[in-house]
Image (cartoon, helix red, strand yellow):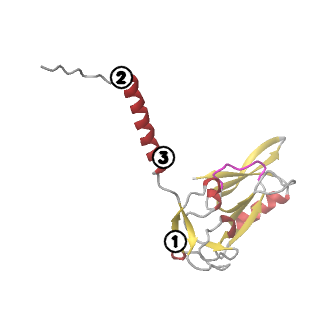
Amino acid sequence: MSIRIRRRLSGWLILSLLVVFSSGVLLFLSLNKPLPTYLVAKRDLVPGELLESSDFEFVPIDLGPLAPKYLSSVSPNLQLLSQIPAGELVPISRLGIEFAENQTGVRLIPSIKPASNVKPGSWVSIWQVVEKDEQYSAELLVERAEVSAVETGEGLFADELPEVEVVLGAEQARLLITALAAKFEVFVLPMP
């Protein structure tokens, strides 16, 4: 009669196998996540043209830190400021908004740096601070305006505060220009 001796697996071996298996699963899951999609021009796009989703194809690309500089969806009334050849990604810096009959664009440098979610296509309110009877008072200038561009200066002597361009109606533009001419403190606040 033969006696079989069963060998027991050591705890360290089981722990090592479990760690290797878990690492493999985590690596697979991290590499298997879907890539964000960005717009690529299907044809040569010319300045002044209104953009439509049929002009683009959606391509999954990992742009890393450059992602906020490129367009990932088409918003209404977007207009090209310069030419984009077929097959190229669409930089946000080459886009503007077509104005309606009673609209205009005003570019301003807010008194403080705006929130990070103030970007083209977002909505903001604009406030001014004035001195009345030796007290400072905040007043709402523009209840709701769409941001058409946000540009940060580049170079050695560039100002740290970005320029924010907003689309306004004629009356709103008059109020904002008056506040800027009077050198009041002007603030841009994000809205939902």
Quadrant containing the N terminus is top left
Vertical comparison of 23 with 40: above or below: above
Task: Identify which residue is drawn at 43% across, 32% down.
Answer: 19
Vertical comparison of 58 with 113: above or below: below
Front position among marks 3 and 2: 2
- Whole-number angstrom distance, CA of label 3 to CA of label 2: 31 Å
The answer to whether any part of residue 84 appears in the image is yes
Which amino acid, mark 1?
Glu
Front position among marks 2 and 1: 2
Residue 176 at what x, y percent from top left? 76, 60
Which amino acid, mark 2?
Ser
Look at the image and give the residue range highlighted in magenta. 110-118
Q: Which mark is residue 30?
A: 3
Left or right relative to 60: residue 145: right
SS majority, magenta: loop
Q: Earlier in the sequence, mark 3 or mark 1?
A: 3
Front in this rendered view, residue 173 or 122: 122
Front in this rendered view, residue 119 or 131: 119
Tell me where residue 16 sits by quadrant.
top left
Task: Identify which residue is drawn at 52% across, 66% down.
Answer: 59
Residue at the disc numbered 1 = 57
Label 2: which secondary element: loop
Task: Identify which residue is drawn at 77% across, 59% down.
Answer: 108
Task: Identify which residue is drawn at 74% across, 65% down.
Answer: 106
Front in this rendered view, residue 142 or 75: 75
Q: Which mark is residue 10?
A: 2
Residue 41 at what x, y percent from top left? 58, 74
Vertical comparison of 134 with 191: above or below: above
Q: Earlier in the sequence, mark 2 or mark 1?
A: 2
Label 1: which secondary element: strand
Residue 54 at what x, y percent from top left? 51, 76
Left or right relative to 182: residue 186: left
